[in-house]
Amino acid sequence: MRPTDIDPSERPVVLIWELTQACDLACKHCRAEAEDRRHPDELTTEEGKQLLADAADFGDDQLVVLSGGDPLYRDDVAELVEYGTEQGLRMTLTPSGTASLTADRIDDLAEAGLRRMAVSLDGPDAQSHDEFRKEEESFAQTIAAARAARDRGLPLQVNTTVCGETVEDLPAIRELVADLGAVLWSVFFLVPVGRGTVLDPISPERAETVMEWLVDVNQEADFGIKTTEAPHYRRVALQHHRESGGRPPSGNGESAGDDRSTGITAGNGFAFVSHTGEVFPSGFLPNSAGSVREASVVDIYRNAELFERLRDPNELSGKCGACEFRFVCGGSRSRAFATTGDPLASDPLCGYVPKGYDGPLPDTQSLAESD
């Protein structure tokens, strides 16, 4: 099923389950502030299987992303992938670039039915990436794992964080994504939560420039592009499409289709289950709508008041609420929550001012570039 065929009021395009917050890395942007030990109240294997069985009630081929921390800190990952596959779920994984991500481990996951693996690259070389991830050899281990996945025939996704420290390296990372044969480049625009509060976000003006560049890359590259926590990429792409007549970007996530497409935002086509079973609109919007230990993730997603409000563009306030692109964009609800405490406020990373809008603008001082 294509993302454009999914009704986000009934099911998420992407359901993430954070298996654990344990990880050997200490990445500068980590929302989970991961440590090298597991939480004693993590969902058990059996509880996880119940979550996956419930998730199958969303419908055929529901996408489930197993994430962390480092999901490979748990020894039941292949078992969970196999069980989810048996339930008709499309199981994918975002492991950390550590020594645990071996070719044998990738083979086991592929045999269990894994449909895609995502690795993170936040620099085009060992020096820049390892400094960002705070771990020597992470770059080499990530590249080796990416090539092992490719050799195994497992589709590869590359995730990259955009902040003041990485933005200049994006063109070089783009080349690396192509060299690795990735099918999708997911570009995450920093949300200041967890360890990410110490990083410098880029300014709204710089974000606009980066998104315009990504639109051009999407026209040329053999891989797809999506943004994470930057749904106004859809607005930039649609404006470009209207002006140039070129093809609009395609794919899932916050990529852009046509004027009637709805982008994925927290709670609207996206849901996150924490390591302890709490259901959030996003991992970057840690406002719980319930626990899978007490209710089905399907019921929480469809009926929780928080999710229902996040799915209604008319609930948005400020310039996001007045914007003519709110039905295809809607702004990052996670960034709004992180910067104002209100998930329905305007996204301060977007510099676009709606036509005729003369109301208050979000405070972008904290997003000003340090350079």
Image (cartoon, rainbow, N blue to C red):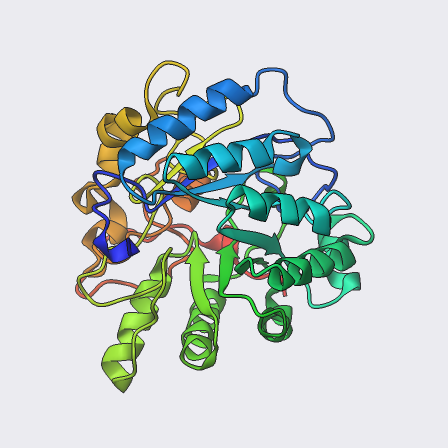
Q: With 312 as the anchor, is 17 left or right in this view? A: right
x and y, in percent, of residue 131 in the image: 77, 55
Residue 241, image quadrant: bottom left
Which residue is the extreme one toward the bottom? Answer: 244
Q: Say how many tags the image has.
A: 0
Residue 296 visible here? yes
Residue 322 or residue 310, whichever sits in front: 310
Q: At 64% from the left edge and 63% from the top edge, which residue is drawn?
A: 151
x and y, in percent, of residue 168 in the image: 63, 71
Q: With 278 as the anchor, is 156 left or right in this view? A: right
Q: At 61% from the left edge and 29% from the top edge, which residue is drawn?
A: 76
Q: At 63% from the left edge and 74% from the top edge, which residue is drawn?
A: 179
x and y, in percent, of residue 313 in the image: 20, 46
Residue 60 or residue 66, whichever sits in front: 60
Residue 364 or residue 74, whichever sits in front: 74
Q: Quadrant of the C terminus?
A: bottom right
Q: With 207 as the anchor, is 120 left or right in this view? A: right
Residue 43 visible here? no
x and y, in percent, of residue 186 in the image: 49, 59
Vertical relation: 155 (above or below) 276: below
Residue 301 or residue 133, whichever sits in front: 301
Q: At 63% from the left edge and 40% from the top edge, which residue is drawn?
A: 195
